[in-house]
Image: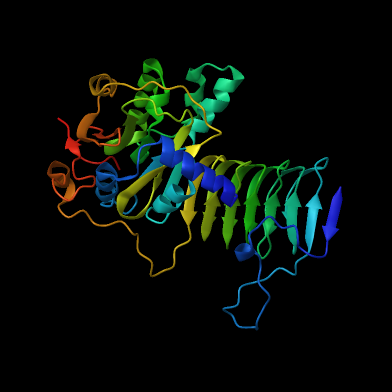
Amino acid sequence: MLKRSKKDENSPLPDSAKPVTPQSNSALTPPVSKGETTTIGEHIAIEGSVRGNENLVIEGSLKGNVELEKHNFTVGSKGRVEGEINARNVSISGQLNGIIKAGGKVEITKEADFYGEIKANSISVEDGAYFKGVIELNREPHRKPAFKEPQKGFSSFEQAPKTGMTPDDTKKEK
Amino acid sequence: MTSATAQNRDNLARDFLPAGYKSTILQQFVNSLGRWQDAQILDIGPVCQENITYFAIRMRKHYACDMFLRLKREGSKGLSSGDVWRHLDYPPRNFDGIQLWDLIDHLDDGEVSQLVSLCYSMLRATGLLMLIAFEKEPALPTTSTFVIGQDYHMSLRPQPHLKLSWHCRHNRALMSLMGGFNIVKSFQYRNGLREFLYEKPGLCRDE
């Protein structure tokens, strides 16, 4: 059954992930949702691409790509989705097999099964979720990887710290 | 997770699990892989927000495949454990590092051999394999996640949904199962945990 609500009060996304009200026409202002949501009921199966300008919740099944660039996409606990998702924020409580490209956040709850690739600004995964996939976080141009350079290259293996370890009485084995 | 549930987990961890510690092996694993701009790591699970974030912000791409949950699900379906490895269907020589955590503590010797062989195939030459092993079965029967914190500090968080069998081993038995890998370092901590870092032999990294 198709349901539409005017307000997005039942969105599973946390407040921080919900679209914000536009402040101005500044180019820096992120695109926003008008807060309308369509729900695909659990007895509905869709095959084919979906494109829209409002939030979408899938409780049924969907096989195809989803294009909601400025809006949120949710897979409910009974939902099953297979395809490429392009949305602002994505929340998964059901099954999703595919590629997610999110301008905002991806949230995977403990009931979720996810297989695929995620490209997003941030990701949250609850303990208990099944996850098999690849994560690529969007990087700001000036942001550098946070890895520290090894001080002495590969040979540092042979120079494991002998002091300063915690706990102090760590034993080194042969 | 509700705050009550989180509090309950904290209490379980404090009462029944080894205390948190600074992981020397993790530090070596992370710093050594930092040599490569395009390093790829496979995290074998259990899925953990902190660990995913930790590696995702440091890597161009971070791979995770929760084999703990797969083991539990396949076990509850009555499938043979050999079937579970089909989920590790990555190409050969794909990773620079694999985080096994304490997965082998939940596998029998035959299963460990299968897993080690797969890891050997998936790692590039000079790739690193990090694993942790309990000295003895912890009082808390559920599996735990090793959660990476600041400055290579690791703590344990119980996973009540994951109850897997235990196969704790002595060092010699464990190391004999590691096939063609070279041991790089191993540490034993007072809290009853052991950490091992292995390297796939090779003169230079596979491109």
Q: Which colouring convention does the figure follow?
A: rainbow
Location of residue A88 by image quarter: bottom right
Q: Residue at x 66, y 68 (%)?
A: A19
Height in image: A141 above or below B72? below
Q: Residue at x 68, y 75 (%)?
A: A21
Q: Is residue B37 left or right of residue B75?
A: left
The foreground one among B20 and B74 is: B20
State which quarter of the image contains the C terminus of chain A: top left
Q: Is residue A79 left or right of residue A165?
A: right
Q: Is residue B190 visible?
A: yes
- The image shows residue B21 at horizontal and vertical percentages of 31, 45
The foreground one among A128 and A31 is: A128
- The image shows residue B205 at horizontal and vertical percentages of 25, 41
- The image shows residue B28 at horizontal and vertical percentages of 24, 46
The foreground one among A24 and B145 is: B145
Q: Residue at x 44, y 34 (%)?
A: B90
Q: Is residue B44 visible?
A: no
Q: Is residue A62 left or right of residue A3?
A: left
